[in-house]
Amino acid sequence: MQTLLSNIKIKVNEKIYVKDPETSVLGKKILQESIFLIDEIGFDTFTFKKLGEKIGSNESSIYRYFENKHKLLVYLCSWYWSWIEYQMVFKMMNIDDPMERLKRAITVVTQKSEEDKSIPHINEAILNKIIIAEFTKTLHTKEIDDENREGFFLIYKSVINRIVQLIIEIDPNYQYPKSLASSIIEGALHQCFLKDHLKTITDCNEKISPTDFYLNLIHITLRK
Amino acid sequence: MQTLLSNIKIKVNEKIYVKDPETSVLGKKILQESIFLIDEIGFDTFTFKKLGEKIGSNESSIYRYFENKHKLLVYLCSWYWSWIEYQMVFKMMNIDDPMERLKRAITVVTQKSEEDKSIPHINEAILNKIIIAEFTKTLHTKEIDDENREGFFLIYKSVINRIVQLIIEIDPNYQYPKSLASSIIEGALHQCFLKDHLKTITDCNEKISPTDFYLNLIHITLRK
DNA sequence: GCTAATTGATAGTAATACTATTATATTTGC
DNA sequence: GCAAATATAATAGTATTACTATCAATTAGC
């Protein structure tokens, strides 16, 4: 992927971490290696002890950055959605036609991510795999309402709201813009998951992508 | 809900359990109380020890029915989808028009479940809440491919395939029947979740239901 | 070069996720 | 109605998880 801006730093809600991992070498190492380790062994069996061993660092040092592994996952997801939003904005820049803008936005959120070499400690392609496999777990907890109140999911909701605005602009009479937008984003991740694991209940494969399915869906749904 | 048949027993894949919980009093108690306890404290903090205390039984006795709590959840979900399939078949019976059949099928899978008094040890309304909150966790594990091969998700896939068949019958030229069907089922659960926890990114509320959204969506998508 | 902050090492606790063993009920088969 | 078979309960034990606390060693900032 080509670099868009060389010195951006993606900001994540301060309440998610104890100490900002972007401010130190160890912090960045935690981000970088946790992505590889979660992808490798899955979030359920991932522990700070295993991560500590992998980065040659102490378990207790990791606790100084994140309260627990759930918060670390929330951080990674929040970072991801922020990065997606940033790409959406760039891809839509200078495009006036709202349908074309929507198509570009949907393409960004439904497509496989490529690595952005300008951010060396985050492998976006693997992070994308983690989002497909694990993002849903950040929402499905008993703490969802508290965490939502704290603003943990603001960026995710902001990405959805950008799509909502485009849908409204294209068809102000369409009755379900929010549900359509949120179901596209969640559904795109789900179709990617099915493509890899439950192939019989999706049309997506090497030739047909979730992007194709959703571009077709919005075309049909919002045609006048 | 009215009783459809008085002596049905919903069959669940034998590989999911160690001993069939439907064959004993304790087994049924495990099913009954696990539904209440998972709803109450959430699947993540649910343990067999806590369940044992709740039913006045020993932790080790529960292990004789289920290898671990994940398998118990898979069992409950499998039971749920089987029950949904059974209701779908009944609601579509003697209806010939494929669009009307599809509407009824979608209504069954997207609607809140009511309690079926004929099955006393399963509270379907609460089980429905568990499915909304926890079903996704049965799929998102590192063991998904093995468990899929073992047939753990056959009933879920069968429910989706019934919808796929109806879509194909209505519009044989529609290119993405499987993706549409799987995204409706997953999406309906997701919209229910958003309605309760992330209200700003859904149109669903007390007046508008996920059923309304999805009936509208298939109407638009499959109109000729 | 001194001080403050960060990290590492070690230890410890309570809970989780089991397994194994043995004792005690309960059921069933005849 | 009794013995045998089966199911359940009680207890104990292990390895791992998910932390917290303390203190020593290292590094960074000025």
Image (cartoon, coloured by chain):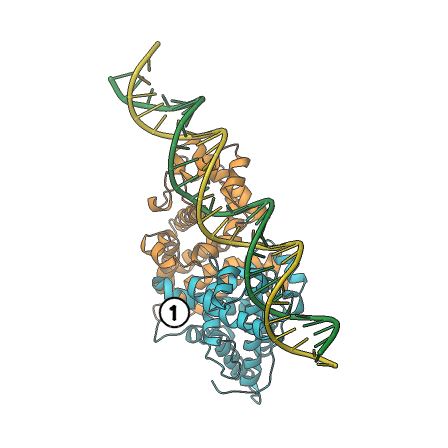
Chain colours: A cyan, B orange, C green, D yellow
Q: What residue is rendered at 54% in x and 40% in y?
A: B50
Measured along the vertical axis of the image, is residue A7 above or below residue C12?
Answer: below
Q: What residue is rendered at 64% in x and 62% in y?
A: A148
Measured along the vertical axis of the image, is residue B213 above or below residue B75?
Answer: below
Taking B84 as reference, is A21 left or right? right
Measured along the vertical axis of the image, is residue D19 above or below residue A61?
Answer: above
Q: Nearer the viewer, residue B148 or B216?
A: B148
Measured along the vertical axis of the image, is residue B220 above or below residue D9?
Answer: below
Secondary element at image label 1: loop
Taking A151 as reference, is A204 left or right? left
Q: Name the residue carrying label 1.
A: B176
Taking A167 as reference, is B142 left or right? left
Within 10 angstroms of label 1, few (less than 14), some, or many (20 or more) residues? many
Q: Position of residue B67 (x, y in %)?
A: 40, 44
- Outermost residue, bottom side: A94
Tag 1: amino acid: Tyr
Q: Nearer the viewer, residue B60 or B29?
A: B60
From where the camera sits, is residue A87 visible? yes
Q: Nearer the viewer, residue D22 or A120?
A: D22
Q: Chain of mark 1?
A: B
Taking B155 as reference, is B191 left or right? right
Q: Position of residue B124 (x, y in %)?
A: 50, 44
Q: How many marks?
A: 1
Q: Position of residue A184 (x, y in %)?
A: 50, 69
From where the camera sits, is residue A188 visible? no
Q: Position of residue B53 (x, y in %)?
A: 54, 36
Q: What residue is rendered at 57% in x and 80% in y?
A: A86
